Amino acid sequence: MPEEAGFPAAKRFRPGSGPPNRSGSCPPGRRVVMLLTAGGGSGGGGRRQQPPLAQPSVSPYREAVELQRRSLPIFQARGQLLAQLRNLDSAVLIGETGSGKTTQLPQYLYEGGINRQGVIAVTQPRRVAAISLATRVSDEKRTELGKLVGYTVRFDDVTSEDTRIKFLTDGMLLREAISDSLLRKYSCVILDEAHERTIHTDVLFGVVKTAQRRRKELGKLPLKVIVMSATMDVDLFSQYFNGAPVLYLEGRQHPIQVFYTKQPQNDYLHAALVSVFQIHQEAPSSQDILVFLTGQEEIEAMSKTCRDIAKHLPDGCPSMLVLPLYASLPYAQQLRVFQGAPKGCRKVIISTNIAETSITIPGVKHVVDTGMVKAKKYNPDSGLEVLAVQRVSKTQAWQRTGRAGREDSGICYRLYTEEEFEKFEKMTVPEIQRCNLASVMLQLLAMKVPNILTFDFMSKPSPDHIQAAIAQLDLLGALDHKDDQLNLTPIGRKMAAFPLEPKFAKTILLSSKFHCTEEILTIVSLLSVDSVLYNPPARRDEVQSVRKKFISSEGDHVTLLNIYRTFKNIGGNKDWCRENFVNSKNMMLVAEVRAQLRDICLKMSMPVMSSRGDMESVRRCLAHSLFMNTAELQPDGTYATTDTHQPVAIHPSSVLFHCKPACVVYTELLYTNKCYMRDLCVVDAEWLYEAAPEYFRRKLRTARN
DNA sequence: GAGCACTGC
């Protein structure tokens, strides 16, 4: 093997706590309470002073659970933690992976009788986490799930009147805040995984801060806010919550050796390949390797190369099981990463950043980090979102490193130099500064936030960014400008009731006028989940011939509708999905989403009618709701958007890829190498003019001629 | 002419 990716010996330190110069992130003057010091766990005296966890129990199982709870690092800090939290309105808790903070803290608060008057909410960025944590904690409390401890995620509410500890997704708590912005039923909100800075958590920061202040002003039950983070960069959190004290909890991570390359690598794919085989030839076969790359195409190519090389390795070299991992991979194939490899065979998992947070793979000893990620960026000048391969942040690199030390000590190979690493951004730009804000602004308006332009975000999006969202909502007819006050129109209020992007909510609301709500509900559901189309690159011809029967010359929306209809009419099941290259998991989700949306329509007394095969009214409806997303064929055979004359192209995944319709509406623009329109529908220019005469007065080329 | 990181309501 070539040597250019060789690694010099590196320092040893513990991950999860961030870079070794830990003190750097604790400026003097801030209240940092060390609840457990390094090497903690010896304080026998402290242990005896702890109050009992729960009623004494006789069951051996119960005792085992109890012992396990007591062995967690957080247990020794229990008394101190409770004493601190009892008197605080807000606190920031740093807890390393494995500290037990998420499962234990809510129980301590409950057992300690703090905030007994209300429910303790614990938010999570991901559904699976909310569900498994609730299951775990209800088990520890020896209660039935949904009684004392429960969870609420979309499509699944396992709570009751008795529920006092409630795990929920951050998006779900946000939705609850629309109907009660003071979050009255909660006495305490714990925002977990705050370091991930999801758009929902970021909006919640503002929502809980406002609710806390308002409740105090109104003399209501106080709201305790606890922000939990796994990283040390919590200054922002503390400042934002009026200088809330920072409590530090040591975790139980295994040491990880970190290696950097001696030279910068201009070809990270090649460097990754070399590293994998270097490790493969040197390390025992029981140690698995996790490689971070940027996307499906890259991962599939690398997987193939690895398998090819692995076939021709010298005798005595272990065999290799190469497993790609990315979100659009069918579920059954994702599950393979959890199965152990046969004896004498090494697992090599080649993954996107899905393995950074969402999926934890057991047995990983070696992490190969290319330092690259594919992520959305927001360009405030053009107001456009761009999906691009870029450098990871330092936080992200540490997160990847930490994946090597889940079960035992590990090794992380960074395919960049230490100097390069030092130049990485400290933190990933929070999602709220990288995304279209139309949904967020609609939700804030629905909560009757007095002035969304000055809303107290922890990391403020730029004014241009906020204005772009307001302009979009305005075009959708959601806004009412009165005396310099922004309010929602009745349509805007209805839009906010749907768990959808505003433009899709508007499409549904318009559909009753075109008597095609049943069809539009199906289309919007299909568009709002991951694609139901499964396109394995190796079987392209097969896919094309099977899919032919669904394709409509009217575009992707009608084609998707055809697929869903056939699936339903035939009584579609997994076998049908497999035969037709349809992702069955996503298809099931479509049905669930559709039922939820239909329910919301019925609740607002909207007539739900079918156009009975009349596709023109469906397309007219799409033209009326997506008129701001229009592109027209130019004399030279290319396309340009109607409003800004941005050159665009039909995405290769579209059924219209080889066609040249004069005028189309699209669901979204996607910038990669080029600016692509995704999910197209052929429309009549006249329909567009009808939909928004003012908007198109001087714009529409086809209508003018 | 040729392509799509990850969540979530």
Image (spheres, coloured by chain):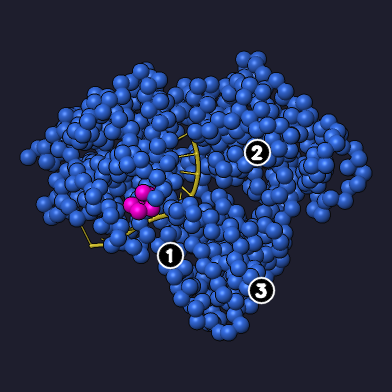
Chain colours: A blue, B yellow
- Residue A243: x %, y % from top left: 67, 35
Q: Please, what is the three-letter code of the amino acid marked with disc 2?
A: Thr
Q: Chain of mark 1?
A: A
- Residue A508: x %, y % from top left: 32, 29
Label 2 sits on a secondary structure element that is helix
Mark 2 and mark 3 lie on one chain; the one further toward the N terminus is 2
Residues in magenta, as a range: A576-583
Mark 2 and mark 1 lie on one chain; the one further toward the N terminus is 2
Question: Which residue is labeled 2 in the image?
Answer: A135
Q: For residue A204, which quarter of the picture?
A: top right
Q: Mark 2 near mark 3, Cβ–Cβ under 8 Å?
A: no
Question: Which residue is labeled 3 in the image?
Answer: A284
Say if residue A284 shows up in the picture.
yes
Indicate whether A127 appears above or below A402: above
**A112 part of magenta stretch:** no
User: CA–CA distance between discs 1 and 3?
Assistant: 25 Å
User: CA–CA distance between discs 2 and 3?
Assistant: 36 Å
- Residue visible at 25% across and 41% down in the picture: A558
Judged from this view, the residue extending furthest toward the left is: A705
- Residue A349: x %, y % from top left: 54, 63
Label 3 sits on a secondary structure element that is loop
Q: Chain of mark 2?
A: A
- Residue A143: x %, y % from top left: 71, 32
**A578 part of magenta stretch:** yes
Q: Are marks 2 and 1 on the same chain?
A: yes
Residue depth check, mark 2 versus mark 1: number of the one nearer the observer: 2
Question: Which residue is labeled 1 in the image?
Answer: A300
Say if residue A75 shows up in the picture.
no
- Residue visible at 63% across and 70% down in the picture: A343
Query: Residue A66, labelled with which disc?
Result: none
Tell whether A637 sits left or right of A519. Answer: left
